[in-house]
Image: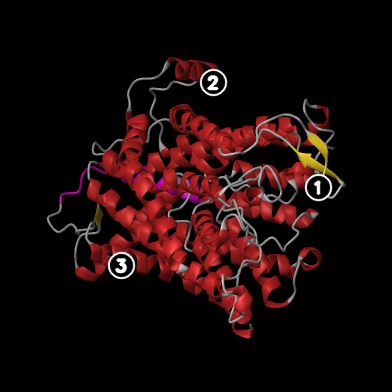
Amino acid sequence: MHWFPAAAGFLTLALVLAILYRPLGDYMAWVFTSKQHWRIEQLCYRLAGVDPDRHQSWRAYFKSIIAFSVVGFILLFLILRLQHVLPYSLGMPPMSADLAFNTVASFVANTNWQSYSPEQTVGYFAQAAGLTVQNFVSTAVSMAVAVALIRGISSRGGRSGLGNFWVDLVRANLRILLPISIVAAVLLLAGGVIQNLTGFTDIESVAGLTQTLPGGPVASQEAIKMLGTNGGGFFNANSAHPFENPTPWTNTFQTLLLLLIPFTMPRTVGTMVGDQRAGYALLATMAMLFVLIYVPLTGFEFAGAGTAPELAGGAMEGKEQRFGIVGSTLFATATTGTTGGAVNSMHGSYTAFGGLMLMFDMMLGEVAPGGAGSGIYTMLVLMVIAVFLTALLLGRAPVYLGKRLGVREMKLVSIAILVMPTLAIGGIAVSFAIPSVQAEIVSSMGNDGSHGLSEVVYAFVSAAINNGSAFAGLSANTPLLNIVLGIVILLGRFIPIVLVLALAGSLSLQGKAESTLELPLHRPQFVGLLVALIVFIAVPMFVPYLLVGPFAEGFVQ
């Protein structure tokens, strides 16, 4: 009986995504290939002083991303440091320099790791004009990088141009993110999510006590938080808070928003390269990985109560009654499988093996289905590796969608897949090797033993992969931890971007490779191989941490 609601919720979500797959995917392809500029877009280009019809090389594209991100970093840092003198500050003091650095790095990098309680730390102006703005533009940057790689693959004339970053940035915001977010915000308002500027309101509770209720422009931030796979909550409880996510209906809708762009971008790939079979192969791989996480995660949580008859409904610790186990595990699978990082349940309260599945979902590399933009370019990087290895095994030409994969391409993708584990494992090792950082980590851990180690591993993996969710037991708001995690977040964001753009530039220089022995990459056998390869790449590097963390905890229990 437990599996009926689990299957029903999953199938409903899958049906809606299937309905939206073609129209939204084709629409996004049109947005990034249209030759016409809207008037408001032309105004943006004039204000920025850029030529929208000038194609950029991969180096120029990356320099534009860095310049834009640096400016955004400085502006947001100033807003957080000076929020006490800005309108609608609610009397909030300025953020400390280390916390502001961590927060700015997190939001600029589309990670939204939060080492603070938002309703007690950030005023409305900083939330709306600072954090919400970065929710839009950091997502647009990810989508722009993905589109640049798709252009590199689809190029047939040997041109080095990957499009124009400023055009992609403006169009992603004005034509995709903003209109969908407006509709989503209205629907969230209708579902009970609050939107006001009332500050804090004191009320008398049913017990006759005084209770302080927070307000805020929540629905407008919630929409882009989920659509852009950002994840930063307006309240400390994130999407478990009834003002952010009041009903099972809004919970399902938020899960849909998380998965909407990542699961429809394979259609964009197929349309832009002129071969929908390539898009379906990517989609099938993402879907299989999603199911491989969701099914055992839900099973572990239903079985987590053991044989106690009063807990026969499953392990409900850390989960909201209004969502139940199914609404919690489906949301958790979506948020750790994307760069979402939002939570509607406390991941640290999951069963040991449930927590293992959530960590494993991030360790896969955010490809199940990954973030808005970052998911598809990570999947394409893994596709290049799979094509090359399969070609070597079968004696075929290593060609993907008409592009020959040579030494340069393989060097770039080989480095790209090592970035996340190097930053996560290296960050843990270096942090424990420095006595002052180690002392802060130990003092911040909410638990000792295996579960405490899992909290630390989860935090560094979440930072390195730009996810932003946490086990919630680690109180990471200490000076050195804020700096260390902020650096890991920035490196985890921009190193893969430069490698992906370099790959796009290398592919765009090629013409179409003529080969009669090109691999049939759309067949189920290759999709299965790609799934196995992704798991094989992810698992071995983290096995020691998993053995002494969630595995040890689970077998002891």
* x 47%, y 70%: residue: 296
Magenta stretch prevailing secondary structure:
helix
* x 39%, y 48%: residue: 263
The residue at which mark 2 appears reads as 48
Q: Give how far apart the Cα atoms at labels 3 and 2 are.
A: 46 Å
Amino acid type of disc 2? Ala
Amino acid type of disc 3? Leu
Q: Nearer the viewer, residue 528 or 346?
A: 346
Sequence-wise, which precedes: disc 1 or disc 3? 1
The residue at which mark 1 appears reads as 206
Magenta stretch: residue 285 in it? no
Q: Residues within 10 Å of mark 1 (few under 14, many from 20)?
A: few
- In the image, is residue 429 above or below residue 495? below
Q: Is residue 266 left or right of residue 454?
A: left
Residue lying at the far bottom of the rendered structure: 556
Mark closer to the observer (1, 3): 1
Mark closer to the observer (2, 1): 1
Q: Secondary structure at mark 3?
A: helix
Q: Is residue 78 left or right of residue 158?
A: right
Q: Give how far apart the Cα atoms at labels 1 and 3 are.
A: 59 Å
The residue at which mark 3 appears reads as 529
Amino acid type of disc 1? Val
Contact flag, marks 3 and 2 (Cβ < 8 Å): no
- Residue 65 visible: yes
Q: Secondary structure at mark 2?
A: helix
Q: Is residue 408 left or right of residue 315?
A: left
Q: Give how far apart the Cα atoms at labels 2 and 1 are.
A: 55 Å
Provide the residue span drawn in magenta.
496-514
Sequence-wise, which precedes: disc 2 or disc 1? 2
Magenta stretch: residue 504 in it? yes
- In the image, is residue 155 above or below residue 334? above
Q: Count the marks.
A: 3
